[in-house]
Amino acid sequence: MSVSAITISNLSKRFEDIVAVDSLSLEIEWGELFGILGPNGAGKSTTVNILNTLLDPTEGSATVDGHDVVYDAEGVREVIGVCPQEPAFYPHLSGRENIMLMGDLHLVPKDVLLDRIETMVRKMDMEDYIDRRAKTYSGGMIRRASMLMALISDPKVALLDEPTVAMDPMSRRAVWDFIRELKASGKTVILTTHYMEEAQELCDRVAIIDEGRLIELGSPKELMEKHGAKNLEEVFLKLTGKKLREGV
């Protein structure tokens, strides 16, 4: 096991004349629940997509469990589970069938796979709809099923990109409890979110980024004390002058 779960060094990503990530450097420790926060277009999803090997950086480097995201992409994919911002699933299959398909792709033994699905479905309170066709799911149902698809291989590192978008408050709380269990089991969890309450409630540390640059790093408590704020949203507004869902 490498010293850090994830190491990001002077990472940049440009798309023609747009700088999506700008010289970002971070160390994320094993077992840490780490939040990446920022408004729309801040570079959160681009960073996640570099870490999960979907994008190559323009400059700099990143490693996951010691595997370079460019030169050892296969090694990275073996240790991560990704819940993307835009879920990918087969709408004519049930939620259970989609999850089983993902488990089969990761070569999870059948008996282990069946037991794992039952346990995860119960923890996520999905029993009532797990065997319905996915095309009938609400946005919140899709997000829950996508999380199980991402985690069915029991990865060391979970990358959760806006996992509670389109969820009602009750569903969001159920996902929060599930994420806490991931951390308690020893997994490293990277969480991108617009919801500062979510990050304040769950994360050990957070990185606030804006226009692709790191502007603040620390635990929610440290940042609130440092900036004399009563919550993380106040910290963000003081640092950027932007509301959370403003584009950049």
Image (spheres, rainbow, N blue to C red):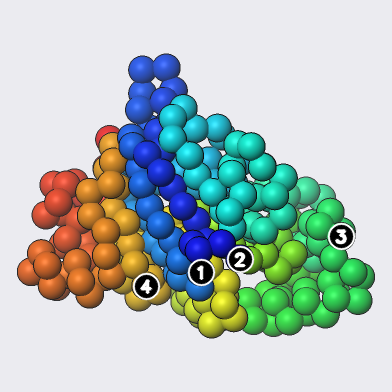
For label 4, the SS is loop
Q: Is residue 83 visible?
A: no
Say the numbered circle drawn on residue 86.
none
Vertical side of 32 occupied by 235: above or below: above
Q: CA distance from mark 2 to mark 3?
A: 22 Å
* Circle nearer the N terminus (1, 2): 2
Q: Residue at x 54, y 82 (%)?
A: 184
The three-letter amino acid code for the residue at tag 4 is Asp
What residue appears at the point 28 percent right and 70 percent down from the top-left corner?
219
| Residue highlighted by disc 3 | 107
Q: Which kind of residue does numbered mark 1 sit on?
A: Trp
Q: Amino acid at mark 2?
A: Met
Alpha-carbon span between mark 4 and mark 1: 12 Å
* Closer mark to the observer between disc 4 and disc 1: 1
Q: Looking at the picture, tell me which residue is in the foreground, 147 or 16.
A: 16
Query: For mark 2, does the 10 Å Cα neighbourhood hold few (<14), some (14 to 19), or many (20 or more) residues?
Result: few
Instruction: Check disc 4 and report the residue beneath it.
Output: 204
Mark 1 lies on residue:
30
Report crowding for label 4: few under 14, some 14 to 19, many 20 or more residues within 10 A (C-alpha). some
Which residue corresponds to the image point at 50% horizontal and 63% vertical from the top-left? 3
Foreground mark, 3 or 1, reads 1
Q: Count neighbours of disc 3 (C-alpha within 10 A) and say few if under 14, some if 14 to 19, many if 20 or more.
A: few
75 to the left or right of 7: right
Spot occupied by residue 16 in the image (x, y as percentages of width and height): 42, 17
User: Quick check: marks 3 and 1 in contact, CB under 8 Å?
Assistant: no
Q: Which residue is mark 2?
A: 1
Vertical arrangement, residue 16 with respect to residue 90, above or below: above
Asked which secondary structure carries label 2, the reply is: loop
